[in-house]
Image: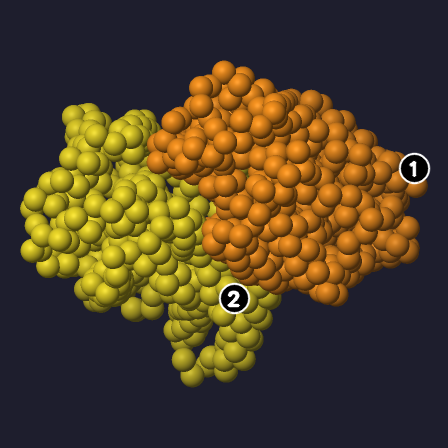
Amino acid sequence: MLMTLIRRELLDNLMTFRFAAAVFITLLLVVANTIVLLKDYEQRLTAYNTATQESHEKIRAEKIYSDYLGKLVVHRPPNPLSIFNLGLDKQVGNKIEVYHAFVPTIWDAEKHGADNPFLNLFTSIDIVLVFQGVLSLLALIFAYDALAGERERGTLRLVLTHPIQRGYILFAKYISAMLCLLVPLSISLLLSIILLTTATTVALDTDDFLRIGGIVLTSLLYVSLFYLIGMCISAMTRRTSTALMLCMFVWGVLVLVYPNLILTAVDIVPQPNTQISAYNQIKQMWEEWDRKNKRLLRNDAVLGPLSQNGEGWGFRLKGGEYSFLRDEDKPSILLYFHQTGFYAGKIKAESEPHVPRVQDYYRFYNRETVNTVERAWLVRKPALEAIYVQPANLGQMLLKFSPTGLYDAATEAWAGTDLEGIQDFFGTVQRYRRAVVDYFYDKKIFESRQWFAADEGTADWEALPQFAFHRSDTSINAKRALPDMLLLLIMNVILFIVIMLIFIKSEV
Amino acid sequence: MWHIAKRELYDNLNSLRFALATVLLLALMLTNAVLYLREHPKRIQAYHNAAAGAIETLESRSTSLYRLATEGPGDLHKAPSPLRFCAEGDEAFLPTRVSGANYGRRIAGMTPIWRMFYPQETPNLRNIRPDFTTLDWAFIVGYVLSFIALLFTFDAISGELERGTLRLTLANAIPRHIVLVGKFLGAFISINIPFAVAVLMNLLLISTSDAVQLNAEAWGRLGILYGIVILYTCLFIALGLLISAAVRESGVSLVVLLLIWVSFVVFMPNTLASIGSRTSVPIAYEEFWVRRIQLADAAREAYTNKYGDSQTTPSVHVLGEYVTKEAEEHERFNEAYLKQQIEQGKRARAITRISPTAIVQRLFESFAGTGFERHLQFIENVQRYARQYREFVIDTDRADPASLHVVGIQEGMSQKPVNPEAIPKFKDTRSLNRDFNTASTDLLLLVLFLGVLVSGAYLVFVRLEI
């Protein structure tokens, strides 16, 4: 009996014009946007490859160790799954400098290839966004007359004269509608995956297919939730036209209005108090260290004269070619540091006796610098969290009151383009910086002659630890996506029970 | 005709959709006003502080003409539009200033002359919040109101066909086009009532607050915006009637309308912009810098060669020529890069004109004085001011007979102090006239769209078999 019911419903849905139109539009939108996104991805990949190559050459042209700011640069590769959900992948910086005098964060990152500010108005449409808008609308259109329509036509009465439980009828309707909705979903996914695999630049591995599977599963939950919302409205109202209007307005509010409304409303400007106090603290640490450094230089019998009484940026060794100051002072992202040094092509014989003393000094200077950075990081990290991450999380959390927000968050987590996925990269960069500093300590590079002079052997950048970034495991993606998926599932179950209760109690 | 319109109106006024539309529009418009009142005074304050600071810096340079000639006018700030609640544009991500400065750099041991810099940095890079569209009028009209218009019209004809009342109406001696016009008017008025109420509340809230002052021009612009809204709603009503008559079944008509709506309103503008932006891609920023350095090197080389045989001309003149040329070349280079970026933005925008929503978005930006077109106007203002400033420096120098008239060199310029009042100050102005000019194509397109849809609806309805 259940099979008969399902078959009837299925035929009812499949043979309609609305079904054909919906499948057509979904396919059109998904294919068009996949092509656009694929081109975009390829462009970003090319930019990434060129930038990586250039940075690689740039650091190797450097003869001494000390002046490597802006030369030791790592780049964030674009995520191939950003075609499904772009998330933050394109928006956040993808070029980050590695330097011992600051801890790299997401906010210090720049972009290889500057963005055109005049294109910011347009958002990129990804596949999840198409599903989010079109499939939810479709689910509601399938659902609004599921019960109210049959009641109006009187066929519900007819069906109930047979000895079937009402639950079965609901179940049959649900199953058949979901099967119908699966058609546009699966065909469009199939087409986009075909497009992806034919593009030679996109390399998808097994893990990626698992992640795509996760996205599909989430999409199913999302579509099913909207179908159930429509069915609930249909069960509650007596007339199809009322049900339809309610469905459309519910869609408008949940998909179109609520996310934008809530994000505009909580458009929080960073709290200036935290920012100013943290920035001042960090600046104070550096100034304290600077005073200590200058005091030492001034009082030292050898270094004092060489550095012009502690005021110089480098040392006046004979053969020194230029001295430099590398500093950064950005209160908005709490970045403050300065480093001085100099470059000597060939140190003359008369300055040779001073060299060990200078080397000794640089050991102290660099060690203290790294310590200052560690101390400043203890202040900077929580402050950055408070200024940038918390408002973002608040927005993210408020979005989750709409199924759209949950769907978006879960698919982002699967694709690895959410904030945590991006932070994974910056975590790796932070560890890499640590590894570079450790390498400098281990090989005594901070106190080496090559730190400032290029005469007795130049800097060996080949031996430096290499940077490698791998996207997190599928299990981690799953772990991040699971809470939101679970919420979607619970909503589904609750709605189903509610519909059941309404339907069982309703008079036909 | 009025009879039909009235009947439609009564029908709609009692319906659920009318109530829901009113609530939705009111909620959106009130949120819009509240947020605007919270943000705008801060923006105005920030702008005034920045502009006052810039003028102060400029006047502090009046100690000598040489300083004015080398350090330049400093930062020039973009005035925020009081109508930003109508269209946010992408204001938050556009640069708010252009600077004319030399940044204290020294080139070949000399202080260079100031030139224009167009800052690139956008705050978007540090933004890790979820992406969203700001709730401005353009969004409320472009997305929500068009959606509501479709919900009001999808069953206007097909519904009556199904119920059989259309046959009854046409049995009377009324021409069909009158029926259509009646329906059109009925739908138009019933959509406009909730919208007008919502707009009224929004404007009441904004105008009663003393933090924001809207002048007569702003009210005129609001009037124009309202006219655009009317055109746009008419367009969607015509579309609704067209499909409703063509499809004959309310359920199907709604599905078709919604799919058209989703593609044209939500997806098309963004997808097309992405395609359009690819037709004109500016050179990479890195390459821009490399070329810039090459250019500076070439200029310096040319100058050193010339300086070698400077016995014939006094060195002051050679030096003056060099600094002037270097600044000019750099500025031209910056402008060329900016032009490429603007070109890309223009291309991206031009192609989106296929979607009426994108047209309305552009029109809203133009008349609200925000977004891309406004930024172009700001840049034009800045460039005009830059010319004026240069002329001022040259004229002041000419007025002093003791000067050698070599701009950019300390010894070659007038040594007299300059009256701070006399220095031209930058004023960022907007002109309604110009806005009309840029918007005329879009307005025309919108009217054409409307014409096509209205005549389509008429043709379909007249040939409809009942």
Identify which residue, A475 or B330, lies in the foreground: A475
Chain letter belonging to callout 1: A
Query: In the image, which lettered chain appears orange?
Result: A
Which amino acid type is marked by label 2? Arg
Which amino acid type is marked by label 1? Asp
Tell me what residue is drawn at x 50 percent, y 64 percent: B275
**Percent x, y of residue B96:** 38, 46
Residue A335 lies, with reference to residue B331, above or below; the image says: above
Tell me what residue is drawn at x 48 percent, y 28 percent: A157
Q: Is residue A55 visible?
A: yes
**Percent x, y of residue A29:** 53, 56
Mark 1 vs mark 2: give the one in front.
2
Whether residues under marks 1 and 2 lie with C-beta atoms below 8 angstroms apart, the answer is: no
Q: Residues within 10 Å of mark 2 (few under 14, many from 20)?
A: some
Name the colour assigned to chain B in the rendering.
Answer: yellow
Identify which residue, A150 or A183, lies in the foreground: A150
Q: CA distance from mark 1 to mark 2?
A: 49 Å
In the image, is A483 to the left or to the right of B402?
right
**Percent x, y of residue B328:** 40, 68
Q: Quadrant of residue A269?
A: top left
Find residue A442 and name its label.
1
Q: Quadrant of residue B340?
A: bottom left
Residue at which label 2 appears:
B278
Q: Residues within 10 Å of mark 1 (few under 14, many from 20)?
A: few
Identify which residue, B85 or A455, lies in the foreground: B85
In the image, is A400 to the left or to the right of B388?
right
Identify which residue, B8 or A218, lies in the foreground: B8
Tell me what residue is drawn at x 88 percent, y 54 percent: A462
Q: Quadrant of residue B37?
A: top left
